[in-house]
Amino acid sequence: MTNPLKTLWAITFKPIYTRLFRRFFDATINRLNTTLGELATLRRELHNHVHGINVRLDELNARVADLDQQVHTVIAARWDETAMARRMAALEDGAQRNGAATAPEVQATPAPPK
C-alpha cells in the first residue's frame, strides 16, 4: 500500500527536480568537457615545447662532444711539442758533451722597407 501523499509529491515535484538536476549536471559536464579540451591543448603545446628543447639539447650535446674532441687534440699537440722540445734539449746536451760544434749563429734578416 502506497502513501497517496508520497505519490502526489513524486508526481508533482519529480519532473521539476529532474530538470534542475539535469541542468546542473549538463552545465557541469559542459564545463568539464571545455576544461578537458583546454588541458589537452596545453598538454600538446607542452609536449611540442619539450620536444623542441630535447632537439636543441641533442644538438648542444653534439657540439660539446665535438669541442671535447678538439680540446683533446689541442692537449695532445701540446704534449707532442713538449716531448719534441725535451728531445731537442737532450740532443743538444749530448752534442755538447761529445764535443760537437754548436750550430752557427743565425743573423736576423732586416725587415723589408715600407
Image: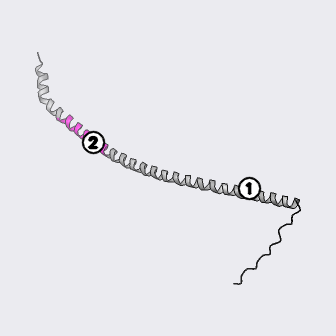
Please give the name of the residue rendered at 11% of the width and 28% of the height, measured from the top-left corner. 11
Q: Earlier in the sequence, mark 2 or mark 1?
A: 2
Q: Could you tell me residue 72's position as x and y percent? A: 63, 53
In front of the other: 66 or 76? 76
> Contact (CB < 8 A) between labels 2 and 1?
no
Residue 1 vertical position relative to residue 72 in the rendered view, above or below: above
In front of the other: 93 or 10? 93
- Check residue 35 in the rendering and tell me which mark sits there, or answer none: none
> Label 2: few (<14), some or many (≥20) within 10 Å?
few
Identify the magenta region. Answer: 19-37
Question: In the structure shown, which secondary structural element does the residue marked by tag 2 occupy?
Answer: helix
Residue type marked 2: Asn
Task: Name the residue beneath numbered marker 2.
Answer: 33
Disc number lying in front (2 or 1): 1
Q: Quadrant of the C terminus?
A: bottom right
In front of the other: 88 or 54? 88
Q: Main secondary structure of the magenta part?
A: helix
Please give the name of the residue rendered at 78% of the width and 76% of the height, measured from the top-left corner. 108
Task: Name the residue beneath numbered marker 1.
Answer: 83
- Residue 32 in the magenta stretch? The answer is yes
Between marks 2 and 1, how big is the CA–CA gap?
A: 74 Å
Badge count: 2
Please give the name of the residue rendered at 12% of the width and 29% of the height, measured from the top-left corner. 12
Q: Could you tell me residue 3's position as x and y percent? A: 12, 19
In front of the other: 60 or 66? 66
Tell me if 68 is positioned left or right of 112 in this view.
Answer: left
Tell me if 65 is positioned left or right of 19 in this view.
Answer: right
Please give the name of the residue rendered at 42% of the width and 49% of the height, measured from the top-left corner. 51
> Label 1: few (<14), some or many (≥20) within 10 Å?
few
